[in-house]
Amino acid sequence: MVRIRSASWVLASQVTSLLLRFPLSVVLARGLGPAGKGDLSLVQLVTSLSLAFVSLGLPSAVTYLAAQRKVGGRSVLRLSLVFAAVPTLVLVLLAVLTGDWVTAELVKVSSSLHLVLGCLALFPSLVQLFLSSYLVGLGEIRTTAITNVSLLGLQLVFVSLLAVSGMLTSLAAVYAWIATTIIGATWFARVALRKGPAEGLSPRGVIREGLTYGLASWAASAVGLLALRLDMLLVSTLGTVSAVGVYSITVTLAEMLFFIPRAVGQVLLPKVASDPDEGARISARMLRSVWPVTLSAGVVLGALAWVFVPVVYGQDFLQVRTVFWLLVPGTVMSAIAGAAGSYHAGSGHPVRTLWANVANLTINVLANLALIPRYGIAGAALSSSLSYTAGALMQLLSFKRATALTWKQVLVPTRADVQEVWFAVSDALQWKRLKRYR
């Protein structure tokens, strides 16, 4: 029987990432203040949105094809280098030509150099995305998990050294982040060349065979990411960079709740791609197990944030306490949507996720435009929860129709589910026990 413990390596990496992201956010908030933290968050937002829109969904297609052993590491590396270089050059040129207007009206970072760096970071980020997607498709969960944790730890080291030396500025933090991304892309390239089949589809063959799947997946993921991140962009456009800094800390805390859903999704996609019938059963079990854990973690983290945010982050970030609670319902619903979305992607039907994300984005835009001018970042958080809930409900309906399961089978945890979650979490907190799954 396939157990939730198969996600333990990814879950362990997410738990460790959580432990690393917290001190990283503290060092950045204390060292940069709301305005500097806002600068860094907006630079990373430029990269992540560019990443989603220029990839055309091919990283998801690479995962799908790698799970079926149709592509080798060398082809994926060649494809990633070409695919990353062209859009990066175009975006950097646009940033140089229009940077002053963009930074004044849309992405209100301190200088056009921040914008250019955000565009430059697209190259190593896209290469890393292609190669890590390939390794996930091959089932190299442990390798990917350990690498991602190590890169986050390295970024923490870089930022901490800058803070101790008195050299931590928003630009220095951006350089540290880009350096970490380059190191990650290089390491993933080294590993990918040693894994998987020696022969397979050429880069052109990957595009030809994977583009149909990839475009549907791309549309879904790009719209989904825009729904997740548009609130921060609108806070920048309608508010100030300092408001972005405060809101980014709130989002960082809320995203700590995603460590289990992300682990589930990363394991589900290749499993569903290789065995759709078994994948449906596993998806249902993971879906009904994930949301109670995410809700419980949100309540605990919200209570801790109320006490410790003023002490840890400082009085400038006091609003994080109340805004976080407005994000919790949406975070729980996103956990549900993530598990269902991974099933749709793995079964070759990402268009089901696309329509849910379109609804999510539409409600997000309308609600943000109505609420941010009046309520600031509290309005952004409330808009996100409303839109995430609508998108998650659509994902659930399509998952239920596709699998012919009852609502009880989809949403109500069983005693066995609770035991599986306990095993997975306990294994994640005891890395030595994970040796049995190598």
Image (cartoon, rainbow, N blue to C red):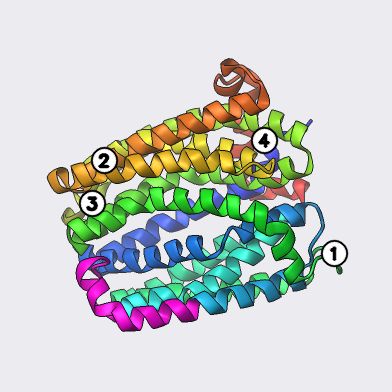
Taking the spot 73% from the left edge, 70% from the top edge, the residue there is 204
Residue 367 image label: 2
Which numbered mark, 4 or 3, is in the foreground of this view? Answer: 4
Amino acid type, residue under disc 4 in the picture: Ile
Q: Are marks 1 and 4 in contact (CB under 8 Å)?
A: no
Judging by the rendered image, the residue that carries numbered circle 1 is 197
Is 202 left or right of 413, judged from the image as shown?
right
SS at circle 2? helix
- Mark toward the viewer: 1 or 4: 1
Do we see residue 208 in this rendering? yes
- Whether pointer 3 and pointer 1 mark residues with C-beta atoms closer than 8 Å, the reply is no
Say if mark 4 contacts mark 3, CB within 8 Å. Answer: no
Q: Earlier in the sequence, mark 3 or mark 2?
A: 3
Quarter occupied by the N terminus: top right
24 is higher (above) or lower (below) than 338: below
- Mark 2 surroundings within 10 Å by alpha-carbon count, few (fewer than 14), some (14 through 19), many (20 or more): some
Residue on which the image places disc 4? 4
Q: Which mark is residue 311?
A: 3
Residue 304: image quadrant is: top left
Q: Is residue 258 left or right of residue 403?
A: left
Identify the element where label 4 is drawn.
helix
The answer to the question of whether label 1 and label 2 lie on touching residues, with beta carbons closer than 8 A, is no
Magenta span: 88-112
C-alpha gap between disc 2 and disc 4 = 37 Å
Report the predominant secondary structure element of the magenta stretch: helix
Please name the residue shown 23% across and 68% down the image.
108
- Left or right? Give the position of 90 relative to 83: left
CA–CA distance in space, label 3 to label 2:
32 Å
Query: Is-magenta flag for residue 125?
Result: no
| Sequence-earlier tag: 4 or 3 | 4
Rounded to the nearest whole Å, what is the CA distance between mark 3 and mark 1? 52 Å
Q: Position of residue 359 (x, y in %)?
A: 41, 38
